[in-house]
Image (cartoon, grey):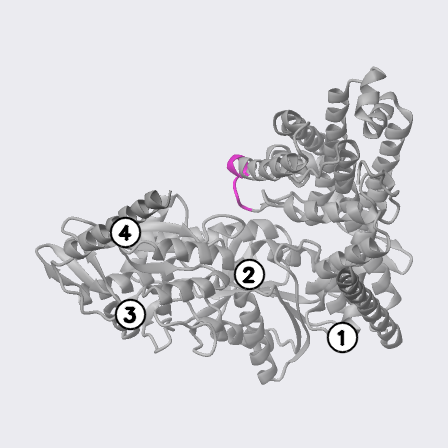
Amino acid sequence: MSKRFLALIAILVAGLVLVACGGGGASTAFECTDEIGCVEVAAGAPIRIASALVISGANADLGLDSQHGVEIAIEFKGDVLGHAVELQAEDDGCSAEGGQTAGQKIVSDPSIVAIIGTSCSGAGVPLAQIASDAGYAVVSPSNTSPALTDPDGAWKPGYLRTAHNDNVQGAAMADYVYNTLELTTAAAIHDGDPYTEGLANAFRVAFEEMGGTMVAFTAVNVGDTDMRPVLTSIAASAGGAPEFLFFPVFTAECAHLATQSLEVAGLENTARGAADGCFSAAAAEAIGSSTANLYISGPDLAFSGDTYTRFAEAYQTNYGSAPISVFHAHAFDATNMVFACIEQVAKESDGSLLIGRQDIRDCLYATENFTGITGNLTCNEYGDCADAKIAVYEIQDGDYVAIWP
Amino acid sequence: MRDRLAKLNLIDLFLWVARAAILAVILVGTIKTIISNPYSLRNWEDFIIFGIAQGSMYALIAIGYTLVYGVLQMINFAHGEFFMSGIFASTSAVAIPLANAGYLASHPIPSLLLIALTSILISVGISLLTERIAYRPLRYAPRLMPLITAIGASFFWQYYFRGLFGSQVIPFPDIPQLQGSLPFLHTQVLKTHVLVIFVTMVVLVALNFFISSTRPGKAIRAVAENKDVAALMGINVDRTISLTFATGAAMAGVAGMLYALVFQQVHFFMGFIPGIKAFTAAVLGGIGSIPGAAVGGLFLGLFESLGPSLFLQSLGIPAFNQLKDVIAFTMLVLVLIFRPQGIVGERLKEKKA
């Protein structure tokens, strides 16, 4: 019995040694000098990048839209240094668990050069951690939570984004409410997710700085449907019913809040506001006819230029509609930033490529005046690359129409 | 022996401290709220009406859990999916085409009846299919197996309906005649809430009549009492069990319709949380008891709606509304500590417990 056991162990160990030697032997064509590792792309093999965006569930429009941006960037680019580009599309589920799963799946594949994602900041926090530990570079086209590029918050080396930081969006919304709508009392509702809480908080800080008063700052749960009790307690706040109610949450809860806030006593004259988590064709449909007095902030989509014209045509041809959410252009720019850096740092030999992971990161952080659809991108040391422009929209007949600035 | 006694005492002590702490929080919070009184009478009436409306839906769904438990002593975790399937399919296939054709606005009553009927029929169909395929072959298997199968069935139906109608949130069409509200005491009650409460009452009375006074209802009760003896008395046990599932699913179908009217959106995952809540309501009221499910549902709805404002707000807890589920489940724990059989449940005999 024990002899057989020993023999088994011996065979297993021998197998391991063989595999290890074999692996070592195969990668001698190049010498990897990068401190956190390299990706080797054999001659004729594709360069692989991954996306981790929300492509299922109530917020699928948000992620699919970005994924379309990535796909169009790949299509426009064609080959990078003579290699085709292959996309592995994962789902971030718009949740911490989803980000965790997508992250683990991606980093278990050493042939992937960089990650475009995530859609939701809540998924971005675990994914940034996992990808950073594994040496990958992550560029998010859609995470906007201030915490993700805050070195004291959730920032991790290797994480960057082309979406705006919500400190900008919160301040823009506060500016619009205080100076344009001329309202002085407000309340905010988030759902505990880093994106929603970060944005509600950014709005609160900016609004109070301008001289406004926050009468309530509270939260609901993801998945809640009956918002009337929380709205009733906001209407009965000690400071009186707010003149403006800000709920930067995602599609389903946003639609419930938008519909039910019209029905709660005391909030009849309150203006309502939501943000880019509630900015998609599906969200407009879910909000339906409850659009009176509803203002939605998001990135300014008034893009122009030849590239954008081509982009919009390709989007229409490939997917049969105009862009369905807001971060398609940011995803296009993020993907092109990655391509530019691969071209810059890859070492070529006999048609195969060696890409250093630290080199890619350094190159991405050093991005300066990169011309994209969304503007001129310059990254700071914590990965905020956006040329952030925020607009405020109204929903008119199911379409988002920019009304400010 | 002494060791064991010492351990037991410690646990008992801990439980008593936990009970005392929960009660103290509730009492202190409530008294502080009553003293500071941040809400008007109208607000309180609103909270109560929201709670009753929400609780009515929980009650209707909870009936399905309690009926099946009464007959099979099995927790049918796919019941939330029976609720979802009916209204999700009915919204996509009936309500939206009717609304687009303008018929919903011009003839709201026949349209609503048609939508409700479709919802009920699909819920019942799905429940019968699940019972026949997933549960009946396991009727005499150990009790854990149908439970696991039920969870599997739940996933299956979620993703099946997602495949059929998509993963996006589908808005339920507006019905102009149901918009607005009616005056009541010091407040205004939404017409949809009036409809929810009225329909729930009618349905519960009808269900009570069905169970207590009709032959099939008597058969359900006989099978719940003792399957073998019921079979000896000439009752077709399999058919009666199917009937039990169908009755529960019909209630879920009605609840789905009401849910869509109040919340105006449906999606494939919408059955999960109401399902868990209704299960809680069934346990709260006393699982196996039909009045228990109704009472449990109402209590749960009221706890959720009143609880945060009644005793969390004045304790200075930030974002207290986010804790409404905590309140609901704490209430469940509390009821189970003081009355393990549930609010109106009977003490179960050894066999069923």
Assign a secondary structure to mark 4.
helix
Q: Which residue is drawn at 42% across and 54% down?
A: A102
Contact? badges 1 and 3 (CB < 8 Å): no
Q: Mark 3 points at which residue?
A: A361
Q: Please tell me how crowded label 1 is: few (under 14), some (14-19), or many (20+) other residues with Cα within 10 Å.
A: some
From the viewer's side, name the closer residue of B39 and B299: B299
Would you place residue A197 above or below residue A184 in this image? above
Image depth: mark 3 or mark 2 in front: 3
From the viewer's side, name the closer residue of B304 and A101: A101
Q: Mark 2 points at which residue?
A: A394
Image depth: mark 4 or mark 1 in front: 4
Assign a secondary structure to mark 3.
helix
- Where does residue A141 sit, x and y in percent of width and height? 39, 62
Cα–Cα gap, marks 4 and 3: 37 Å
Horizontally, is A217 left or right of A19 in the view? Answer: right
Chain letter for mark 4: A
Cα–Cα gap, marks 2 and 4: 66 Å
Image depth: mark 2 or mark 1 in front: 1
Q: Which mark is residue A240?
A: 1
Instruction: State whether discs 4 and 3 lie on one chain.
Output: yes
Q: Please tell me how crowded label 2 is: few (under 14), some (14-19), or many (20+) other residues with Cα within 10 Å.
A: many
Assign a secondary structure to mark 2.
strand
Tell me the amino acid under the disc marked 1: Gly
Tell me the amino acid under the disc marked 2: Glu
Q: Name the residue under label 4.
A: A13
Chain letter for mark 1: A
Cα–Cα gap, marks 4 and 1: 73 Å
